[in-house]
Amino acid sequence: MATVSTLIERQAERDPQAPFLICPENEARLTFEALASHTRKLAAHFDALNVAPGAKIAFLLDNGYWTTLLLLGIMASGRVVVPLNAVAGTRQLAYVLAHSDAELLFIGTGYREKLTGVLEGFPRALRVIDTDEQSGPDWPASAPGTPAARHEPEATDPALLLYTSGTTGVPKGAVLSQRAIVSGGQNVAGGHQLSPADRALCVLPLYHINGAMVTVAAPLASGSSVVMPRRFSAREYWNLIAGYGCTWSSIVPTIVKYLLDRAGDEPYRFGEESQLSAFRFARSATSALPGVMLGQWESTFKVPIIETLGLTETAGTVMTNPMPPLPRKTNSVGKPFGCEARVIDKGGSVLPDNETGEIVYRGDNLLARYYKNPQATESAFRDGWFCSGDLGYRDSEGYYFLTGRSKELIIRGGENIAPREIDEVLYTHDAVLEAAAVGVPDENYGQEVVACVVLREGFDCTEAELAAFCSDSIGAYKAPKRVYFMDSLPKGPSGKIQRLKLPELIEAL
């Protein structure tokens, strides 16, 4: 099994001058040969700083040239990379830095002020290296030498320590091995039939598993390239695809909605524009894509969107719908790719097709453990299968459908209600930009159904209108009894709505 290091060296030997990374803000480009050279130099720097193989190295950076180099270079050197969530608060950042045992932190100039709060009362010394997107890390004055004996990590060695978004309690650190990283990249590349001719547009942050695995590890595994702006911009999305000949992009439902909302302002004739002819698909992951949004995307932009499923703990993709012309199914996350999956009941028995239970996984892409949390690790596995917490079923053709999370299931008067079913209905209303149903305590029914909604700009509707809209579609007992209008819904780093935070926000209204 290849490691990150051998994967980089293999691509550098195959086509050294082929582009791997393009950064549109400054037109910086990185070939596979330069990637290999840079990763060797990074290893020498870490040796000079006495940061041993296996040590944890964190970064707090926006997407870009040096962020990508550090992400891959730290892993290739046999150290463990700890990407920090740039939108997290100082309390969570301080927890992750302390809990991860990070010895070294690379920080962007724009996050220096935030770091002051993070390091207040920090329990130990932490070396910090300022990192400019143009010039790179501000290394200590002493220049590194060539490593006496280059460390080659094993496939089972830890490579990535990525913390979950912490929707409840403190975040957990998922330890992913070299094997899992390579497997994660290969699963995306194989599932989407990527070749060296492909070029991704990366608009998701590299501190999230989607950005790191889907739009960095997958191009590396397939020998293709990636265009990486520092941040997502709905205004620039199609310009970047047209200008750089991108063939695909990984996005999330919130971004789908943003792009649909401004589709009428774009200068392109979708489906006819030669500048966009290379763009063959978009992929959606992280949270369920409502069927109505999928239909709107394909009818507006004239390009398929492939619904997939991935988790931090599985190094990204575990399910994907087949690529055209093979059939895709609306509201399905597709079929397992690169791993095994099955649906089990509470006792662990495998359920027949079309019966809902918990979806579990087995494969090389699974996390090794939760860092310093043996109890969470033990409870996450059953007989070698990873218990995802996702509820769903498999149909007779092998396609999987999610119905919700086990922790998010609403139990009203003994009836199980999947919140996603309510979300789907709300998203079909013209006025709704974002929606999430959730259960709140109720003295009569145990839980009652409510919904939180963000309206689209220029639209208006009432609580009674949305409640009646849901009741007409899915019945009164599933329809929200209250609808709360909000300016925004809480989200994780990838844009996934954090449903379990909503009851607390509702209480504060």
Image: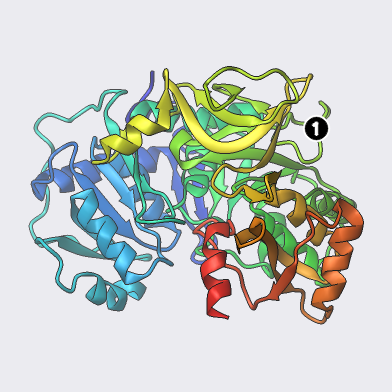
Coloring scheme used: rainbow
279 vs 13: above or below: below
On the question of residue 264 being in view, the answer is no
128 vs 248: above or below: below
Q: Which residue has dot 1 on it?
A: 328
On the question of residue 95 being in view, the answer is yes
Q: Residue at x 67, y 45 (%)?
A: 414
**Which percent across, then down, holds residue 376?**
34, 38
**Which percent across, then down, holds residue 343?**
61, 24
84 vs 404: above or below: below
16 and 398: which is toward the camera? 398
Tell me the kind of residue under disc 1.
Answer: Arg
Q: Residue at x 44, y 34 (%)?
A: 16
Asked whether, in this view, residue 494 is left or right of residue 438, the answer is left
Quadrant placement of the C terminus: bottom right
**Which percent across, then down, holds residue 218?**
53, 36
Q: Residues within 10 Å of mark 1 (few under 14, many from 20)?
A: many
407 and 29: which is toward the camera? 407
Quadrant placement of the N terminus: top left
485 and 409: which is toward the camera? 409
Q: Residue at x 21, y 63 (%)?
A: 129
**Which percent across, then down, holds residue 395?**
76, 24
Q: Secondary structure at mark 1?
A: loop
486 vs 171: above or below: below
Q: Residue at x 76, y 49 (%)?
A: 421
